[in-house]
């Protein structure tokens, strides 16, 4: 067969993910913290982007579930509208930008509205904006002002705290090197993560010498640091308190029995009575199981809700975007036009054209992201209104497909929107994914029940059970069937464990001991009174 080259024309359809589309998808799944960091990077990278100033008379970043009508002077979520950047110094339109930059922009976005000529632009505080406002010289902060961040003390880490004590406790250079290696192997909780034998082989020293240095490190503050397991951590703290007697040693050696609350077996092993066992358990509870958590802990960051829900005057629910979680940026078309009209090189014109296109994409992607979040959140509120009105017991089963079909979007889009997004409701702050729960069938084949609502009912049953009639998992299944909920025993056990509720045997033992202790206290009080 002879090989030959020929031209063939075929017609087909393919989906191409452009960089701009990938950026929009990435913005959609960002949390508000990640989005703020991304926008800040873009502001530093793109000279045509800058933050929109807040105006006291309105909040352009606020959106509700009502029809999205842009306010006068604002296009979308922060883009300048007609009259925002007009005037002789900013006489710019789409055609002049294309001609000056030598790039056609109409194939990417719809033509922007032409600004009204002869109108002086105004800043949000009412001040006029001149042509030199972009020079960077006006309104600069005072360079002589003190930097308050320079006076903030750095947080002391656990490794630094232990290294300072090591320099005082050990004088031998080799022991100090061993001690520093041990400190480097201590995790944030305060536990030694590398075996002594492995560390001795790595350092080329005898294991007893490493063990001796470890004994010195275990005397450092905080008490219990350098332990290899929980039992050793508690034993170190008890020794420092002079409470590590033979009975306490056996109790620490049998922590699994303590976790199961098997006090009968513990009293038999330790050889103590009920009163002494209660004192020993109370002493254990006063210890710190993670001695290192007081050092180097990352600061907690308060969750900022992306959506707020409040009750309207007519009893309906009003869904609004939180303006504090929406970064607002503007595109400085005037600066792009000035560069295009100047005698700039082709490289500079191409750079400004790319920056302008990127800035327009970012502002429109932010607007589309806000609208999508609001649309998904509004549909969630509509389908879970019973939860907002009556509580978690009335939550309905919900999945991504239900929301996607209702608003005409793909399930993957809804999944990205609900990731790392939070909703503030009158019943608390919830992640959007919290409202999506599995469906549990009804016993008579009727309407299904939400898994979260069933979990809440199980917790209520266990909280209300009397001490002399503790409910087993089978009894909970029977009670739920009376409520028309068809559920298996293993599912009840799984929900109970997810709520960190012990088994019926452990609950019965605990309630019996509490009742016995209460009777003993009452009898002692009666004897004292007599």
Image (cartoon, rainbow, N blue to C red):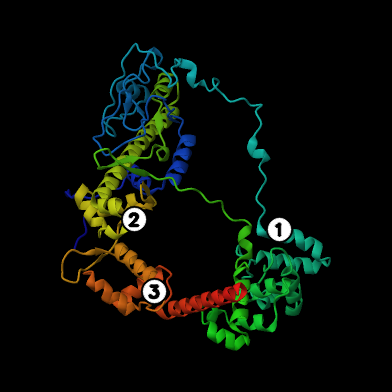
Residue ID for mark 1: 161
Distance CA(mark 3)–CA(mark 1)? 50 Å
Residue at image coords 71%, 61%: 162
Looking at the image, is mark 1 or mark 2 earlier in the sequence?
1
Horizontally, residue 51 falls left or right of residue 249, namely left
Horizontal relation, residue 164 to residue 362: left or right: right
Q: Do the residues labelled 3 and 1 touch (CB within 8 Å)?
A: no
Q: Mark 3 points at which residue?
A: 466
Q: In which quarter of the image is the C terminus?
A: bottom right
Query: Looking at the image, which residue is at 48% across and 76% down?
Result: 515
Q: Is residue 308 above or below residue 349?
A: below
**Foreground residue, 159 or 500?**
500
Image spot of residue 192 (x, y percent): 64, 70
- Return the disc, 3 or 1, that comes first in the chain's sequence: 1
Secondary structure type for disc 1: helix
The answer to which of marks 2 and 3 sits earlier in the sequence is 2
Tell me if mark 1 has few (under 14), some (14-19) or many (20+) residues whose alpha carbon lies within 10 angstroms of its own: some
Mark 2 nearby-residue class (10 Å; few <14, some 14–19, many ≥20): some
Of residues 428 and 321, which is closer to you in this image? 428
Q: Which of marks 2 and 3 is in front?
A: 3
Q: Residues within 10 Å of mark 3 (few under 14, many from 20)?
A: few
Query: Nearer the observer, disc 3 or disc 1?
Result: 3
x, y percent for residue 58: 37, 27
Mark 2 = which residue? 433
**Residue occupying the point 23% across, 52% down:** 383
Q: Which quadrant would residue 211 be assigned to in this image?
A: bottom right
Choose top left, top right, bottom left or bottom right for residue 297: bottom right
Residue 136 versus residue 383 in the image, above or below: above
């Amino acid at each position: 067969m002879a090989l030959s080259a020929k031209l063939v024309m075929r017609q087909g359809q393919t989906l191409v993910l452009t960089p701009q589309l990938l950026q929009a998808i990435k913005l959609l799944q960002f949390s508000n913290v990640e989005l703020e960091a991304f926008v800040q990077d873009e502001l530093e990278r793109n000279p045509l982007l800058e933050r929109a100033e807040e105006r006291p008379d309105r909040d352009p970043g606020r959106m509700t579930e009502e029809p999205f009508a842009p306010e006068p002077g604002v296009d979308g979520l922060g883009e300048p509208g007609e009259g925002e950047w007009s005037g002789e110094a900013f006489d710019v339109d789409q055609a002049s930008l294309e001609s000056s930059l030598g790039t056609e922009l109409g194939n990417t976005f719809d033509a922007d509205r032409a600004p009204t000529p002869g109108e002086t632009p105004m800043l949000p505080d009412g001040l006029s904006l001149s042509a030199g406002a972009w020079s960077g010289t006006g309104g600069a902060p005072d360079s002589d002002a003190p930097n308050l961040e320079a006076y903030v003390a750095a947080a002391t880490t656990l490794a630094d705290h232990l290294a300072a004590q090591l320099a005082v406790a050990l004088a031998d250079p080799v022991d100090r090197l061993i001690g520093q290696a041990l400190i480097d192997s201590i995790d944030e909780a305060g536990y030694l993560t590398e075996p002594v034998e492995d560390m001795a082989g790595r350092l080329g020293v005898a294991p007893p010498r490493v063990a001796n240095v470890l004994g010195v490190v275990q005397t450092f503050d905080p008490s219990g640091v350098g332990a290899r397991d929980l039992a050793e951590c508690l034993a170190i703290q008890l020794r420092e308190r002079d409470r590590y007697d033979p009975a306490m040693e056996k109790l620490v050696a049998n922590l699994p029995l303590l976790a199961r609350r098997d006090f009968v077996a513990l009293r038999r092993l330790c050889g103590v009575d009920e009163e002494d066992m209660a004192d020993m358990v109370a002493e254990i509870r006063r210890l710190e199981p993670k001695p290192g958590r007081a050092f180097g802990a990352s600061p907690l960051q308060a969750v900022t809700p992306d959506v707020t829900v409040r009750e309207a005057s007519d009893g309906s629910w009003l869904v609004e975007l939180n303006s504090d979680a929406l970064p607002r940026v503007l595109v400085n078309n005037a600066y792009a036009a000035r560069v295009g009209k100047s005698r700039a090189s082709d490289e500079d014109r191409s750079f400004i054209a790319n920056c302008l296109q990127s800035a327009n994409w970012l502002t429109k992607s932010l607007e589309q992201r806000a609208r999508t979040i609001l649309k998904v959140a509004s549909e969630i509120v509509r389908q879970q209104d019973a939860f907002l009105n009556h509580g978690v017991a009335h939550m309905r089963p919900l999945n991504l497909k239900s929301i996607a079909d209702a608003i005409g979007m793909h399930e993957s889009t809804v999944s990205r929107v609900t990731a790392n997004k939070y909703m503030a409701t009158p019943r608390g702050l919830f992640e959007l994914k919290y409202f999506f729960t599995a469906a549990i069938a009804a016993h008579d084949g009727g309407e299904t029940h939400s898994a979260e609502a069933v979990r809440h009912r199980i917790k209520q049953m266990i909280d209300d059970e009397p001490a002399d009639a503790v409910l087993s998992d089978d009894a909970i299944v029977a009670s739920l069937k009376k409520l028309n909920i068809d559920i298996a025993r293993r599912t009840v056990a799984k929900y109970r464990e997810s709520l960190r509720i012990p088994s019926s045997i452990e609950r019965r033992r605990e309630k019996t001991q509490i009742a016995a202790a209460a009777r003993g206290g009452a009898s002692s009080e009666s004897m004292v009174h007599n």
